[in-house]
Image (cartoon, helix red, strand yellow):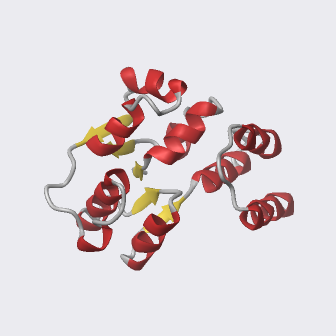
Amino acid sequence: MIRLCDNSALSALAEINQLAILPNLFGTVVISQAVLEEARHPGAPSSLREFITNPPDWLTIVANPLELLPAARHLGMGEASLITLAFRDPAHKTLILDDLPARMIAQKSGLRIIGTLGILEEASLQGLLDFGSTLKQLQDTGFHLNSKLMESVRRRIDAR
């Protein structure tokens, strides 16, 4: 299963040393050139910048679309490029996005989305990590998490 991934999830997973769960969950992960540039930016976490200097085989980098989907033009280039790519290519209908405005546009465009918290939930359910301790690590990085959503995910995990 191929997923298009934004910089936010890559950054968060890099900071908690959990990037390896992406290929375990999804196989191939695709990023746009714009996301690559964000990952290389000096303000990106050093763990992400180090990771992206020698991307693994499961990470595919594609060119930015020449023209952005009108509904996505006001977003950051990473989010806008991914939403446009997903909208135009039926093979890429699922996005890994955390940015709320980007998520809303993707949903209105008929695209499926999952965020960093959803990735951790799925990885926990598959026995790839301990959700509680990994969530704590993520919170310690300063990554913004919605408390209601965190509790909802905890309840779903506990129910299984």
Q: Residue furthest left?
A: 66
Which residue sits at x=44%, y=26%? 49
Q: Is residue 73 above or below residue 21?
A: below
Query: Is any atom of residue 26 visible in this view?
Result: no
The number of numbered discs placed on residues in the rendered structure image is: 0
In the image: residue 75, left or right of residue 145: left
Q: Position of residue 40 (x, y in %)?
A: 38, 30
Q: Is residue 30 above or below residue 84?
A: above
Which residue sits at x=31%, y=61%? 86
In the image: residue 54, left or right of residue 63: right
The image quadrant that residue 87 belongs to is bottom left
Which residue sits at x=78%, y=64%? 156
Q: Residue furthest front?
A: 43
Q: Position of residue 126 (x, y in %)?
A: 69, 46
Q: Position of residue 66 (x, y in %)?
A: 13, 55
Q: Residue furthest right?
A: 158
In the image: residue 91, left or right of residue 159: left
Q: Position of residue 51 (x, y in %)?
A: 46, 24
Which residue sits at x=37%, y=63%? 93
Quarter of the image where the C terminus is located: bottom right
In the image: residue 16, left or right of residue 45: right
Q: Residue furthest bottom?
A: 108
Q: Nearer the viewer, residue 53 or 111?
A: 53
Q: Is residue 29 above or below residue 75?
A: above
Q: Nearer the viewer, residue 94 or 103?
A: 103
Query: Is any atom of residue 129 visible in this view?
Result: yes
